[in-house]
Image (spheres, helix red, strand yellow):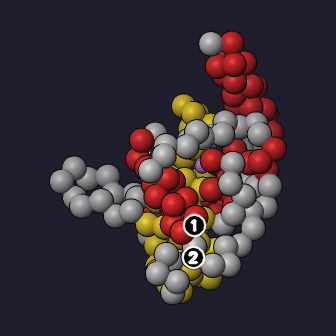
Amino acid sequence: MTIRSILIHPDPRLKKEAEPITEVTDAVRLQANDMLATMYDAPGIGLAAPQIGVLNRMIVMDCVKEDGEAARPMVLMNPEVIGISEELNTYEEGCLSIPEQYADVERPSEVDVRWLGLDGALHEEHFTGLWATCVQHEIDHLNGKLFIDYLRPLKRQMITRKMQKLKREKARA
Ligand code: NI
């Protein structure tokens, strides 16, 4: 298992549409393990393949936050939202590719998602609460969309400038 480095916005690879995964190969399983390890190491509750520079449609997540509750690592390939609630929910979102920046984003509060699992089968699940927000945020990544794209342009530009500065500082270090 390898901890991969996470791309920081702005990066052209974070703006691209990712390609579907057609077969569950050893390379795909390895990628899933690396992504989970990278997510837990960060630490974060979700990670999408483009964030490690891999342009395929894989996301991983684990939104279990309670101490003492069992972890629930999930690997979703080619995830598709097949139903959304009318009711909306606002969460203060963050992103491992936009460190230490948080903003309120409004999304459907519940979603039905279908995906290809590592077992090669199609799965469907109804997500609520933090899971619903997280899965929508991660699927956005596969379509080149970041949570800051929901913000007003001025706020988005402010965050982007902070990230550019952060990247310059990291490059010098
Ligand atoms: Ni993100």
Q: Amino acid at mark 2?
A: Val
Q: Nearer the viewer, residue 16 or 119?
A: 119
**Residue appearing at x 79%, y 61% in the figure:** 17
Res. 20 visible in picture: yes
Relative to 20, residue 131 above or below: above
Q: Badge 1: how crowded within 10 Å, few (<14), some, or many (20+)?
A: some
Q: Residue at x 78, y 32 (%)?
A: 157
Q: Nearer the viewer, residue 127 or 114?
A: 114
Q: Residue at x 57, y 76 (%)?
A: 24
Q: Is residue 129 visible?
A: no
Position of 48 with respect to 34 (left or right) is right
150 and 81: which is toward the camera? 81
Could you say which quadrant of the image residue 71 lies in? bottom left
Q: Amino acid at mark 1?
A: Val
Q: Are marks 1 and 2 in contact (CB under 8 Å)?
A: yes
Secondary element type, mark 1: helix
Q: Quadrant of residue 78?
A: bottom right
Measure how far apart labels 1 and 2 are at the Cα level.
Answer: 6 Å
User: Left of 129 or right of it: where is 25?
Assistant: right
Q: Residue furthest left?
A: 68
Q: Is residue 42 above or below residue 72?
A: above
Q: Position of residue 137 (x, y in %)?
A: 60, 57
Would you say the beta carbon of the disc 2 residue lies within 8 angstroms of ligand 1? no
| Residue 139 in picture, x, y percent from top left | 63, 64
Tell me where residue 116 appears, x and y as whole percent.
56, 79
Residue drawn at (62%, 56%) of the image: 49
Q: In this figure, which residue is indicated by the disc labeled 2?
A: 24
Residue where numbered disc 1 is placed: 28
Q: Compared with residue 173, is residue 144 higher up or lower down, i.e. above or below?
A: below
